[in-house]
Image: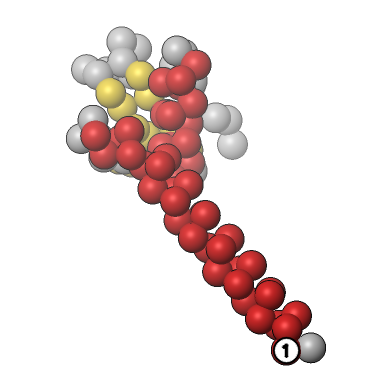
Amino acid sequence: MQDETYINMRREAAQSLLSAAVENEEFNLVSVLGLVPFRDGNMWCVLWGENIQDGIAGFGYSPWDAVISFNKAVHEGENPKAPTP
């Protein structure tokens, strides 16, 4: 039983490290560009450019969601509109 507990603890620790690495990588582009998520109505936004129409933006219900949406927009070359609630 101790071996199984030890293995599970190691597995959980590895998963935590992987999750932290993924989160850091997602925020990397936003950080390099010097962008900061901000509130836009009831949503969070990450904007690269003068405005939403001309720049690249990501929206979400949390700063994390906005960053993920922004990264997706950058990699797919599109500008997603705010999700509808």
Q: Nearer the viewer, residue 32 or 56?
A: 32
**Quadrant in the rendering for residue 47:** top left
Q: Check the image and report above or below for 9 versus 19.
A: below
* Residue visible at 25% across and 19% down in the picture: 49
- Where the N terminus falls, by quadrant? bottom right
Residue 10 image position (x, y, % from top left): 60, 72
Total marks in image: 1
Q: Check the image and report above or below for 77 versus 6.
A: above
Residue under label 1, please give it.
Answer: 2
Residue 68 image position (x, y, % from top left): 47, 36
**Quadrant in the rendering for residue 15:** bottom right
- Where the C terminus falls, by quadrant? top right
**Quadrant in the rendering for residue 74:** top left
**Whether residue 23 is visible:** yes
Q: Check the image and report above or below for 27 versus 17.
A: above
Residue 43 image position (x, y, % from top left): 43, 39
Residue 37 image position (x, y, % from top left): 31, 40
User: Circle 1 sits in a helix, a strand or a loop, which is it?
Assistant: helix
As drawn, the residue found furthest toward the front would be: 3
* Residue visible at 62% across and 76% down in the picture: 9
* Residue visible at 43% across and 29% down in the picture: 71
* Residue visible at 44% across and 16% down in the picture: 79
> Hey, what amino acid is under mark 1?
Gln
As drawn, the residue found furthest toward the bottom would be: 2
The coloring applied to the image is secondary structure
**Whether residue 43 is visible:** no
Label 1 CA crowd tier, 10 Å (few <14, some 14–19, many 20+): few
Q: Nearer the viewer, residue 67 or 21?
A: 21
